[in-house]
Amino acid sequence: MAVPVIDVQDLRTYLVTRWGTVKAVDGVSFSVAEGETLGLVGESGSGKSMTCLSLIRLTPRPASRIVSGRIRLDGDELTSKSEAEMQKIRGRKIAMILQDPMSSLNPVYSVGMQVREPVSLYHGLRGKSLTARAAALLAAVRIPAPETRLRAFPFQMSGGMRQRVVGAMAIAAPPRLLIADEPTTSLDLTIQAQYLGLLEELQHQHRLAMIFITHNLGIVSKICDRVAVMYAGRIVEMGPVRQIFKTPAHPYTRALLDSIPRLGARRERLTAIDGQPPDLARLPGGCAFAPRCPKVMDRCRVEAPPAFPVAPGQTSACWLDAPA
Amino acid sequence: MSAPAATAPLLEAADLTKHFTVRRGALGWSTGIVRAVDSVSFRIAAGTTLGLVGESGCGKTTTSKLVLGLEQPTAGAIRFEGVEVGGLDRSGRRHYRKSVQAVFQDPYASLDPRMRVGSIIAEPLVINERAGADARRHRVLELLDLVSLPGRAGELFPHEFSGGQRQRIAIARALALSPRLVVLDEPVSALDVSIRAQILNLLRDLQRRLGVAYLFIAHDLAAVAHMSHTIAVMYLGQIVEWGDADAVALRPTHPYTQALFAAALPIDVDDAPEAPTLTGEVPSPLAPPGGCRFHPRCPHAMPRCATEPPAPREADGRLVACHLYE
């Protein structure tokens, strides 16, 4: 396997709050290769977004701190970089698309000004060539009449169109790694399908490594190669998408897949996961899923399980999968 | 009021229409009409669930507001227990409002943070039934038990509960007056994935025990298919397909329904239906296209689709508004 674009080892990002230290990211390791998409799934508060924000060092400050771990981008260690050096990595090497395009776009500047900004920054273009490149970017994200659209303001565009503009800005460099944090959650279903197709196309064209954060498992099976399931700041299971969805190993992954209504599988009752999502400031010792786990053992409440290999490329952090 | 025949629907909407006038500028001149809901007809049988699906702006929410009596229809009528709601007298309207309740999407917004849970659940009883304090307390405990919350929950405030528990409180409040129909407007969208199944199961159990009917609005098509007996698909203010839930979800006939359900990505890759991704966006309801409103995006559009609006017709055990099935 070639050198991964992004390689994260034992990342820990903690938040210091009035209620105690919250281990938002607690020992996360993964890597993504060129042209590969890793899906990051889990409930709100499971640490998906905090993991990704840690990569570009944009976690909330001063509350949060990357306590330990390595983050390597094309073999280059990011955790030891200065703030000025990180500035040159954000957007240029690692770009991000967020859920709500209106929070990424400035409502009082035209789309053209906002798309030209990264282009002039990364490529040093000015004047007509700058505008031409900006228009070409809008064309690349399938915005009709790009020259005219450069003069439009975000409020004059639909949600899907705005998210395309954000996509155009994200690939302005183009980056090595694209992080998409629930980019289609605010879009309608048929528009979501269009946008996912576009993302796949852009990724293919630029050989981007992509991290796709979502809680929609259907999207994962559509566009991701591998998936990492997060629970309470840890990756509980990781591996190839089809393999994990067909033969999940970790009890949480299994419960999650069972609890989701599916078209065509008419069931009287869904298999619900008991209990509530964990309170991160008051995590139980041992495995965080233990209080809700149907297969909990004594050991689970004392000792947190490491990731065990269960199949080629598939790991599960569960004592049930510990080699005998 | 005479008892309706056993086969009569609990609620029937007949050519229900709601137009909003758009006013702009200092003089407030009318600059257009939004046909939010345009001649929509459906029926909900007692104790069953009608799922209403469609993309934002298709008129789902306006339809639910019309059913709840929060908007008055421009034309058309709603009949409840066989009686037209528009022509009801005071006591009739009171009966209707008690019989039709709602649960909304965001349980963080729908519960007053300064009221105790017991008072929240008892509020409809105070307003509508003038029950004594003892009777109210008894009923609140009964309702809390119904939604599997402990009795002491009544003493607490909403902020002491998680999202899933709050939605249980909202459901208990909706059931306080023993309604015959509950409008569920995206009841699980704001909840964590692992909690959604708990609430969907609870809603199904309550339907079985109490015989309450649901108007279930959601954008999660698999959840709608799981919950509903019949499904109506809306596009730009009109119902394009309406029929048995399994038939609509698994064998959609209208090109829009086909595209919509194809866009609802299944978890098993092998189950993915082959249907083309729709091009273009939903047109503005201010200026819907002539003829069939879906024709500019339809992969099967014919010349007559641009001029002639298709009437809903019976096809394959359901109603479809499409020239392909005439």
Image (cartoon, rainbow, N blue to C red):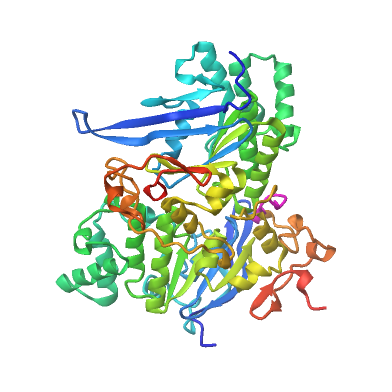
Q: Is residue B4 left or right of residue B305?
A: right
From the viewer's perspective, is residue A137 above or below residue B57?
below
How many numbered marks appear? 0
Q: Is residue A21 left or right of residue A182?
A: right
Q: Nearer the viewer, residue A318 or A87?
A: A318
Position of the N terminus of chain B by quadrant: top right
Residue at figure coordinates x 33%, y 36% from the top left: B35
The reply to whether residue B85 is in sight is yes
Question: Would residue A277 be counted in the magenta stretch?
Answer: yes
Question: What is the residue that sits farthest to the bottom in this orientation?
Answer: A2
User: Where's residue A249, x and y in %?
Assistant: 71, 69
Question: What is the residue that sits farthest to the front in this orientation?
Answer: B326
The reply to whether residue A238 is in sight is no
The magenta stretch is A270-280
Determine the main secondary structure of the stretch shown in magenta.
loop
User: Where's residue A125, x and y in %?
Assistant: 21, 75
